[in-house]
Image (spheres, rainbow, N blue to C red):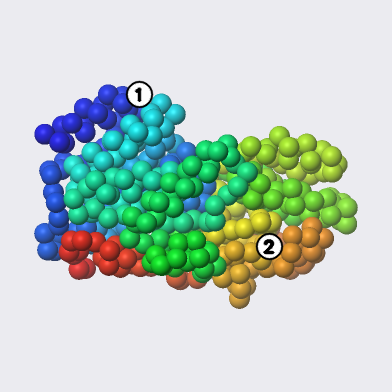
Amino acid sequence: MENSKVRRYASRRVSHLPPVRLLQATNVTSSSPGQPLRVLHVASGDLWAGAEVQLFHLLSSLRRRTEVTVEAAILNPGKLADRLREQGIPVWQFDESRMSSAAIAKALVRIARTQGAQVIHTHRTKENILGTLAAVCTPYGVALRTAHGRPEHGIGRFGKRLILNAADRIAARFQRATIGVSAELCGYLRQAYPGRPVYHIPNGIDPDLVRQEALLPCSYPPSDAFTVGFLGRLVPVKRVDVFLEMARALCTHAPGRFRFAVAGDGPLERALRAKASELAIESAVDFLGFQQNSAALLSRMDCLALTSDHEGMPMVVLEALALGVPIVAHSVGGLPELLTGSPIGHLVPSQDPAQLAQAIEAVARQAGPRSESAARASALPGQLDSRQSVLRYIEIYRSIARAPIAQN
């Protein structure tokens, strides 16, 4: 009876969306010994940024394991939902532009109860709140979250952010654990949520998958100039304005030697284009907009640059390491943990454009011929392979679950 209600609800509310693959389920209250643990991930999916890429690699790796079965509730149509389906992962897809938060919450509770979800793993603020509500209303359900970075400010209405952040802090009290993607972020989380369990699991990717995607066609043409790329959201925390100041310093010091690619979209795009014009470097900077295949674009870069105020453990850096693309980054957040000791990682202690430009020039002097770029060796540490980091997630699922989990 309950399962038919969920199907009717989904059909009524989500009829305008592509078909959603559903599991046949009964009202299950707990796993039998030896049965896989049922895990439901709740994420927004409105973007294809670092958190979404990390979630894709995590779920793809979890799907290969026998200890768990995974599903995803995605609040928006988009690339994340599409790519998860391609991997054979069951997806419940909504559209929060057409559904109220109350309607989504009601649907999530029904899904969690009907599918017998035992662990509800949430990502980002609104999803933490809705997923925790579903866990509280589900027999044997528990919730945990992954924090992909510190809270961002300056995006959205101030009053709405205050309400969401307050509700999120309340939701954290009902979750069994918080996972931070860098040691630095975990320190912040332990201060923000004193007395709550915080675990450190670095982001992971499948390097073989990244290298396969890098071989796909790329619309960005190769250049004879040394090409420096920024890949990410055009939002304040990323400090793309500093990237452009760095680009001007390089163009001034070595005219024609460098080219710059800014890949991504966001609320600052118009202002950043205007800044490039103001700095008189618009002819050297390509604004590429959102790119479906970041790996293919990265393979065209001679260097990746990050100038952010803060970073957790950015997936684009993991992709660059897997592809052997040199990285110059402001030494902040989880980046020192990720790049210290790396043969292709270069940390800069400040956001001073001149210092960043000097680091780029040093990389350019060491660079080999562009023809060798396809053969660049991976510099990704083994512990950042998602096929390894997923074991830690399963260990935590096992520790917080109210029911037994199968042993491999």
The residue under the point 47% across, 48% down is 166
The residues tagged by marks 1 and 2 sit, at their Cα atoms, a distance apart of 44 Å
Where is mark 1, residue-wise? 16
- SS class, disc 2: strand
Amino acid under label 1?
His
The image position of residue 66, as x and y in percent, is 23, 60
Q: Looking at the figure, which quarter contains the C terminus?
A: bottom left
User: Would you say 388 lies left or right of 33 here?
Assistant: right
Classify 10 Å Cα crowding around label 2: few (below 14), some (14-19), many (20 and above): many
Q: Quadrant of residue 393?
A: bottom left
- SS class, disc 1: loop
Q: Earlier in the sequence, mark 1 or mark 2?
A: 1
Q: Which mark is residue 330?
A: 2
Q: Nearer the viewer, residue 372 or 282?
A: 282
The image position of residue 157, as x and y in percent, is 58, 36
The image position of residue 138, as x and y in percent, is 22, 47
The residue under the point 78% across, 36% down is 274
The residue under the point 73% across, 52% down is 243
User: Would you say 81 lies left or right of 256 here?
Assistant: left
Q: Which mark is residue 394?
A: none
